[in-house]
Amino acid sequence: MTLISHWIHGREHSGAPGRTAPVHDPATGRETARVTLADAATVDHAVARASEAAVAWGRASLSARTRVLFAFRHLLATHADELAAVITAEHGKVLSDAAGEVQRGLEVVEFACGMPHLLQGGHSESVSTGVDVHSVRQPLGVVAVISPFNFPAMVPLWFVPVALAAGNAVVLKPSEKDPSAAMVMARLWREAGLPDGVLTVLHGDKEAVDALLTHPDVRAVSFVGSTPVARYVYETATTHGKRVQALGGAKNHMLVLPDADLDLAADAAVSAGFGSAGERCMAISAVVAVEPVADALVAKIAKRMGDLRTGDGRRGCDMGPLVTAEHRDRVLGYVAAGVDAGADLVVDGRLVEPDGDPEGYWLGPTLFDRVRPGMSIHTDEIFGPVLSVLRVASYDEGLALINATPYGNGTAIFTNDGGAARRFEVEVEVGMVGVNVPIPVPMAYYSFGGWKSSLFGDLHAHGADGVRFFTRGKVVTTRWPDPSHGGVDLGFPTQR
């Protein structure tokens, strides 16, 4: 049985003996490895080594840092297939989806390669006689990144390249459910020339997370996960004086107007609802159909679902298993609750015959119609392959339904009416909006993040917000004496 260790100071580190957790292949249900779980003492040791490394790395030239970024970018592209295979083996998503995850992470690396320009400050000459002012942005020191199971490569790549390029040392705590992708990337960073200690990978559960949130030498925390945990992370870390960006959960709606291309909308609903088995914070889990199109739209969605093949992600299937047996059972509970609440179960994913090991964590694509607000399948983030259709009489009713949700991560509108789309863009209370685009994940040079209970903190991930989050601004006012320099002046300094 493979034992997955931590990555501390540029090499594998076993940590304190004792606690481990199982790592499974979701497509077979078999345990494939054990992962070491860090205790508080291991966290202290790792942060101490990272603090030592942060000093020299933060003072390294921008050219030296970006050379490492460019080298890592090349290595990541070269090893993309290897990394995708590791993701599929531990998360379960199909290989094409895993490869797409790596590609989206690679885009953030490419963005971070432009850090010399992104850190460029301003300069104002002669703000007063003989006085100049310039601004700089400097690294924080040691920062922590706590990433979820659903994107074991992409989410770390949202934060780590930006933080490193800005001159910080990073402690990454990946999900213990699929930890190997982080280890693959750590080795690539070392091969790219990153100095020892600048990147640490610590595996662990709540004990490790709490130690990072309260550690006095950790300056900032980036987190992605469910809303209750995001709120806990934000409140705990800010109480201990850290800056925090905690991205929480979602309940993403797709509003379909009567003038929409229903074939396009049905394709989008199936793609965005069942990709990665619905285990995406940007998945569409609720379709809001403005009558009279609901019957036709539901029929088109159901027909497309019938063509999907659920099974082992290494066999060319369309959708893989859920990540763990416990999570699969939780989603099954929501399916049963939807039936009990009176929603119409149009496609029952519990009846799926998967192309894979019978012990895998299977649930096929599931479709409910005539879902009503207040049902748990509508109010809760299910994080599984369950798509709900709600019927409304008008655009205004649909907009009000979307804005009533406590989440505000992503949304989409499908229409051929530019005026309606523009109105939706302005009026919807959601951070990321798609117009005839079902998964509006921004490109790396824009920032990713939602509103309301989908985000705790002021700054979003990557893009300009990411650079600001991982740096501190400083303004320097300078005057150099010249031969005309006068004497003492006790007056208040003013512009002259």
Image (cartoon, grey):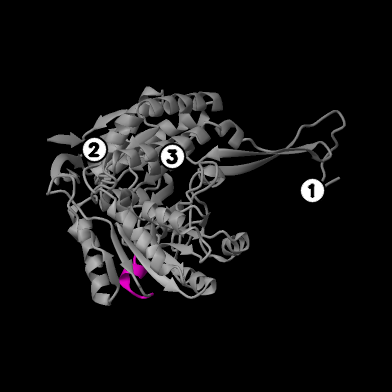
Residue bearing the label numbered 1: 493
Q: Amino acid at mark 3?
A: Arg
Instruction: Reply above or below: 391 against 464.
Output: below
Residues under labels 3 and 1: Cα distance? 51 Å
- Could you say whether the residue bearing mark 1 is in a helix, strand or loop? loop
Instruction: Reply above or below: 81 against 415.
Output: above
Look at 56% across and 59% down and name the residue there: 416
Q: Which mark is residue 200?
A: none
Residue bearing the label numbered 3: 104
- Taking the image as shown, residue 260 lies to the left or right of residue 342, namely right
Q: Nearer the viewer, mark 2 or mark 3?
A: 2
Q: Amino acid at mark 1?
A: Pro
- Could you say whether the residue bearing mark 3 is in a helix, strand or loop? helix
Q: Nearer the viewer, residue 482 or 460?
A: 460
- Could you say whether the residue bearing mark 2 is in a helix, strand or loop? helix
Q: Nearer the viewer, residue 130 or 205?
A: 205
Instruction: Reply above or below: 376 against 270.
Output: below
- Taking the image as shown, residue 45 lies to the left or right of residue 121, namely left
Residue bearing the label numbered 2: 314
Instruction: Assess disc 3: are there few (<14), some (14-19) or many (≥20) residues with their C-alpha within 10 Å of its C-alpha.
Output: some
Q: Is residue 306 visible?
A: yes
Q: Nearer the viewer, mark 3 or mark 1?
A: 3
Residues under labels 2 and 3: Cα distance? 20 Å
Q: Which residues are magenta?
A: 373-380
> Quick one: label 2 or label 3, which is nearer the N terminus?
3
